[in-house]
Structure formats: C-alpha cells, structure tokens
Amino acid sequence: MSVLCYFYAQRGASLTRIPSWLMQHLVLCAFVMAVARGQVRYSIPEEMTKGSLVGNIVQDLGLDVKRLKSGRARIFTEDSREYIGLNVDKGTLVVKERIDREELCAQVSPCSLHFQIILENPMELHRIDVEILDINDNAPVFTRREIQFQISESATPGAKFSLDNAHDSDVGFNTLQKYTLYPPDHFSLKEQMGNDGLKYVEMVLQKTLDRENQEEHKLILTAFDGGSPQKSGTIKISVLVIDANDNAPVFSLPVYRVSLLENSPKGTGVVSVTATDKDKGTNAELRYSFSQTSGKALDLFNIDSESGDITVNGDLDFERTKHFQLHVEATDKGGLTDSSKVIIELIDVNDNAPIISLISFSNPIPEDAAPETVIAMLNVKDMDSGRNGQVKCSIAPNLPFKIQSSALNFYSVTTDQLLDREKMSEYNITITAIDEGSPSFSTNKTLTLKISDVNDNAPMFQRQSYTAYVMENNLPGVSVLSVTAHDKDAGNNARISYFLEDILVNGVSASTFISVNAESGEILAVRSFDYEQTKEFNIRVKAQDGGNPPLSSNVSVKITIQDQNDNAPQVLYPVQSGASVVAEIVPRSADVGYLVTKVVAVDVDSGQNAWLSYKLQKATDRALFEVGLQNGEIRTVRQVTDKDAVKQRLTVVVEDNGKPSQFRFSLSCLSSPYCQSNATDGDASGCFTNLERIFQLFRIIRLFTQT
C-alpha cells in the first residue's frame, strides 16, 4: 500500500485517473510533500473517524517533540474552526472533527484545509495544507420525482426536450458520469457538456407520436456516477401527447451576460430574457421559468413567468460566490421549450472591515527588553478582494513600539526602543487596520501591555548627609535620628533595608556606639555617651534594596554629643592637701591690692557649663581681702596692720555657669612672715616653705598640661 502511495505522490497522479479497482485502497493513503518556507501538504479522504492519523509533523518539518512542548505549539485557523487537531506529545496531526468534503468545499476541487502551526520562544510559523479527497458517499439526486411533458403529435423526430439534471455532491470520477432512458422506443438521450463543466441531458424524439395509438408514455431517466460501487438516481418522465403545436419557442440570445454589484437589494433588476414562438394563439403564449439545473441560485433570484424579468431575491455576497449561472426555459402552451443561460458576474463592494486576530501576546514584558523584542503576533485579513481587501496596519507614532509584516496577513508588534517602567508602567497599544477601498473601512484593536520591573535603580537618601545632636548621659536605646531612602523600582526591588557600615570610631567599631533599625532606618544609641570623652563621630549608613543582585547607596551621618553640666570645677591651685587648708604668707608691709595668691580652677565641661566665677564665701576679716570674680586673684583690700590677726582663714567658692551650677571650695590660711615663730594656735605647721611653693608650681604646670 505504501509503495502505491509513494508512486502516485512522486508523479502527482490525479485521483480522477486512478482505476476504480484501486480507489478503495488509495482512499486510505495520505500524501506528504514538504514545501519550501516551512510548508507541508497532506492528503486524506473525507469522512475519516475522529482520531485518525493525518501526518507526523515532527518528521516532516524536522522538529522534535521537546520543541513542540517548549514552544507551546498550537494550531491557528483563520475561520476559527479546527477540523485537524495537534497531538503535542506525539508530534502528530489527527482528525478532530468529521470532515464532509461536500459541506466544506461543495464542487470546488481540489478541496483543502489551510492552517498554521505556531511555536513560540522563538516564534515560528509553519503552513500546513491538508487536501480532502472525495469518496463516493453521495448518489446522483434529481430535484423532482417526476417530469411531465405535453408533446404534440405533430412534433417531428429530432425535437428536443430539456430534462432535469441530476446533482451529485461528489467530485471527479465519483460524480455524475452518464444517463440512461428506458424504454428507448420513441425517445433517446443526448448529453452535452456546458461551459461550466456540467453535463446537460435532453430527450430527443426518435419517432413521431400518435396520440390515438398511445396517449401517454411512461419513461425512467437514470443517472449513474463513476464510483465503485456505482450509485444511481432515477426520475419518472410522463409524456402526454396532445394535438399539433409544431413550433418551439426560441430565445433571442443563447447566453445572457450581466454584471451586478454584490449586496444589491431585493427586487433589483438583473436582466430580461425574451423568446419568440412562430405559432399563433395559445400555442404562442410563453411562460418563463428557471431550470432545476440552476441549483442554489434559485433561492437568490426570481423570474417573472410572463415578462421574463429576472430580479434579485436574496443576499448576494461576493465573498461567498463570485458568479452565477442560471438556466432559463421558455415553454409554450404546447409544451415545447427552449433554454438559454444567464451568466451573472458579481462586482465586489467594500463591505467588509478588516479582521484583527491576536495569535500571541507576551504580557507583561520586562523593562530591560531589548529593541526588536516581539510583543504580539497578529493575523489581519479582509474578506473583500482587490484593493478592497488590501490592508495596511499601523500604531500610534508616539509609542515605543512598531508593527511590521512578518508574512502574508501576519504582523508582529515589537519594541522600538528601550523601556523604563519608572516613567511608564503600562501602555495601551492600539493597532489600526485600514483597507484601501473607497470609502475605506478600518478596525482597531487595543492591547494593554504591562511593563514588569527590573532592579535598575539604587535606593536614594533624601539628603546627601545627616547631622544628629545627642545630649550626653543619654539612656541606651534612645533614638538619635531616622534616615529615609526611596527606590523608584517596585515590589522586592523597592524593599529597602538599612545597615550600619562597620567603621572605626575612636579606634573601636561603630556598632559599639550606634545601631540601625533595618526596616525603619532609625538610628539608636547603643550606650550612654560622655561628651568629655567623645564630642562627635561620623558613621555611614547603607540602604540596600531587595533586588537580585541588590543595589545600595550610602549616606554620612555626623553625630554631635551635646554637653551637660555634669562636672564640677577642679581647683588646680592652690593644691588641696589632706588637711584641705592651704597656707599662704602675707608680709606685714603688704599694701592695698597686694596679690596674696591666685585660685586656679578648670571645668572639663564646655560652653557656659565651663564659665567659672570666684567668690569669697568666708573670711576671718572680710574687709581685708577680696577675690577677683573672673580671675580668682586674692588681693588685699587695705593696708595690713599690727592689729590684724596673724592668721586669716579664707574660703573661696569656684562656681560654673551651668544649670544647675557645680562648685568647689578652696580653703586658705594666710599668715604673716613670722607666722611660725608667733603662731599660738598650733596651726603653724600648715604654712608652706619656699621649697614647697616650688613643688606646688610644678604640680600646677603638670595639671594644666594634662587638661
């Protein structure tokens, strides 16, 4: 069987030339022929059962099953009806619906199904043509069951009478092949081939009729097709013999040719046919009618039986049928007839708008899609013909997309430039298809395309740098400052986390001073700060998004510690001993304003917390000494006299300017130069010698250098 199929496929043998004894075997053959540009052609008989194998596209297109699955292979038909199905797992085409060639193509031959196999990633189109072969599943059929003729006995041999043609929906050798007439006593058959390829049969009178001998004749007309087994159909013919009417009507033209616009309304005049009869009286009265051989055209046109005017009686559609052939008869009262043809050519009118079918749509697409990325594939067609069916497609020029033809009636929409979701996250792409008719028709189809985010934006802080002020002696965990960053991306790509960069502050890790809330960006103090140890420090905070790979940015944060008045002044001089009393010697000759000593103090705080003032709190004789408010100098207010006590006790208060203020006391014992010899209260041991003053001076210098 496969050898026979191959033999006929190689030679392009027509099925009409295959002998009848071989037809029943070849009906099961499927011819496969590879066509350039990814086309494959198969041939299968009609009426195959569902699931029957049509062909193996994996072998015939050079594909593999994995490619069919990864490319989401599917069938696209322009009329949306699928007779053929695709088995992706096996890579085969199978019959999906019962195929009736006569329903699908009527008398058109060859009869073929055309569809596309579409694959994605990357896009591929493969054209598949499946020719549907005819099988002899229809017998010849006559429209009527019986024909009646009234033939005058004066009819001469050779008179012709048009008979109904049988109709066989099959094609080729399976369609109508011949007629027989029985009995053949008075009539014979004459077959003719018309310009439309159909056979027309006439009954020809062979012998003169004799009404007196036989008033009625009964005949059987049988139509046979060429199938195997052969099928046939019959019609009865009744001939009534009447008296002489020896002239048949004659049409003015054998063929009438007219052109008619499609969509012409009902009642539109097409043409008037006329015939004449040389007889007179009632034998010359004619009636016009359509022959049954006109087929489906009988529903679309009407003929006035008396005038012969033919008018439109149905909906004419150029896209369905481009021309019609009507057979008209003129019959006189005696039953004599003549026939003529009316050929009607339809003129196309632009009455169909283009149809846009979406085949594939990639939505959404990432914003980093390269130019020329295919977004959608479309099928655009117009049922009209000529310029009326020529279509141009376009999209708005202000969009970053373009449309171009990829194959006949197929268009692809691609990116024309780089996209940026942060500028435009969604596009409405309107495709306009317009034909070249006059007036033209257009169709719009809008595709809503979403742009998916790509992590192409790093977080950005609101400021270039931050400065925070924290009062010393703060509680651990206190909020110092909140930093905020924003990311133009979306979703995880815009989810920001904050981190403290591990840098050194005063030789130790910044994390020992500061922590950062990863979600809010709030900066918290890890411990209590001491202004006297650290006055300020700088850290860096990193904002990082959740993209893959993540993007980040840094910001500098300067943290300034603010002073609190938490330190009392420190008296550097006079140096306080364990007895907490310092002795100074004042000569008796000291004049007014004599500098007895100077109280020197410092405060490690800053600002007004370190502004010091000196006050004399207690004194043995307050009228003898005074203390400089700002400089702490102790001077005599008056001349020292012999009446003054040998030992004077002074208490000096050193106070800072903080709120509340901190203070220190300095106690001094002042004596005359001869205090040791004249001391009577046992406190002479508290007076300093000159050597001790030198040691005190060194201690003061050392203390100043340390601070």
Image (cartoon, rainbow, N blue to C red):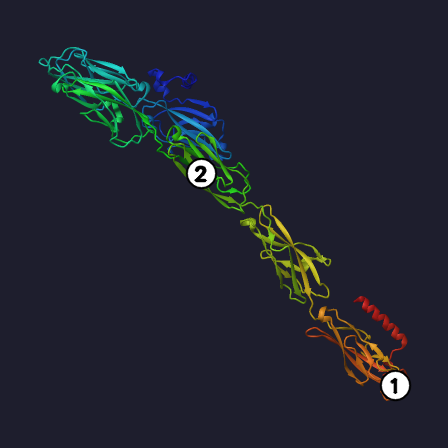
* Residue 618 rendering spot, x and y as whole percentages: 77, 83
Tell me, yes or no, if residue 247 can be seen here.
yes
User: In this view, which residue lies farthest toward the bottom?
Assistant: 643
Residue 1, image quadrant: top left
Q: Report the disc number at residue 623.
A: none
* Residue 89 rendering spot, x and y as whole percentages: 45, 32
The residue depicted at 75 percent of the width and 69 percent of the height is 604
The residue depicted at 80 percent of the width and 66 percent of the height is 706
Q: What quarter of the picture does the C terminus occupy?
A: bottom right
- Indicate the amino acid at tag 1: Ala
Disc 1 marks which residue?
679
- Indicate the amino acid at tag 2: Ile
Q: Which of marks 2 and 1 is nearer the N terminus?
A: 2
* Residue 677 rendering spot, x and y as whole percentages: 91, 84
**Badge 2: residue crowd in 10 Å (few <14, some 14–19, many ≥20):** many
Q: Is residue 486 above or below residue 193?
A: below
Side of 528 relative to 207 (left or right): right
Q: Is mark 2 on a helix, strand or loop?
A: strand
Disc 2 marks which residue?
431
